[in-house]
Image (cartoon, grey):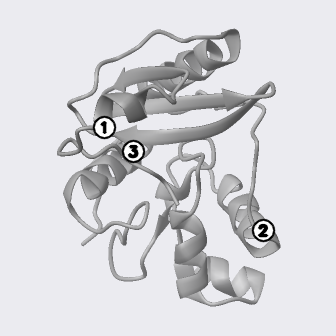
Amino acid sequence: MLTTLNSASPNASAAAERFDAIARLPFGFVGVRTRNACVEEICFLTDDVEARPAANALAQRVVDQLHAYCTDSSNQIDLPLAIKGSDFQRRVWDQIARIPPGSTATYGELARRLNGEARAVGQACGDNRLPLAIPCHRVVAATGIGGFAHHRGGAYERIKRWLLVHEAGSELRLT
């Protein structure tokens, strides 16, 4: 499950220390954690954190690629990823990675491709520790935008909408 920093937590700044970089992107802050030459986590953070320079070359590469993507969604995010999950989650994430920028697939469509259930696909999307690199924002509900990172509405919906509009290059028409 993706973790976010809770601004009400007295340990928010201590929790921010676990990231090798904190980058401010157009939709908000993200924390980047690397380990053993792989990206282990990209995490959406609250707006009360401060950007922090990269602590290592890989973290800087992640930040550079995220900024390039936010400038032009045709810029691919190509990084060594530490993908940890069940066989089903990994199959879902593989299918998500095949959805091109500017396109979407529904939870149900992915479930049919994988002989699974839409709810299980949604759970795998929410468990994705590498959003943007594995673009789970491209998975939507059959009747609207759906959830994002195990959340509905609020900042997460705002981020998902920003990403989808950015990639589509026009107004998003989901209800």
Of labels 1 and 3, earlier in sequence is: 1
Nearest the viewer among 3 and 123 is 3
Where residue 34 sits in the image (x, y, percent)? 67, 28
Give yes or no for contact between labels 2 and 3 (Cβ–Cβ under 8 Å).
no
Amino acid marked by disc 3: Leu
Give yes or no for contact between labels 1 and 3 (Cβ–Cβ under 8 Å).
no
Which-is-in-front pick, marks 1 and 3? Answer: 1
Q: Disc 2 to disc 1, how far (Cα)?
A: 35 Å
Which-is-in-front pick, marks 2 and 1? Answer: 1
Q: Residue at x 61, y 19 (%)?
A: 59
Q: Is residue 31 left or right of residue 25?
A: right
Which-is-in-front pick, marks 2 and 3? Answer: 2
Amino acid marked by disc 2: Arg
Amino acid marked by disc 1: Asn
- Give the number of the disc on residue 163: 3
The residue at which mark 1 appears reads as 11
Q: Is residue 120 left or right of residue 160?
A: right
Where residue 103 sits in the image (x, y, percent)? 53, 56
Up the image or down, 108 lies above or below 172; here it is below
Q: Disc 2 to disc 3, how far (Cα)?
A: 23 Å
Q: Residue at x 34, y 66 (%)?
A: 151
Nearest the viewer among 62 and 74 is 62
| Callout 1 secondary element | loop
- Give the number of the disc on residue 91: 2
Task: Tell me where residue 162 sits by quadrant.
Answer: top left
Of labels 2 and 1, earlier in sequence is: 1
Q: Residue at x 56, y 86 (%)?
A: 118
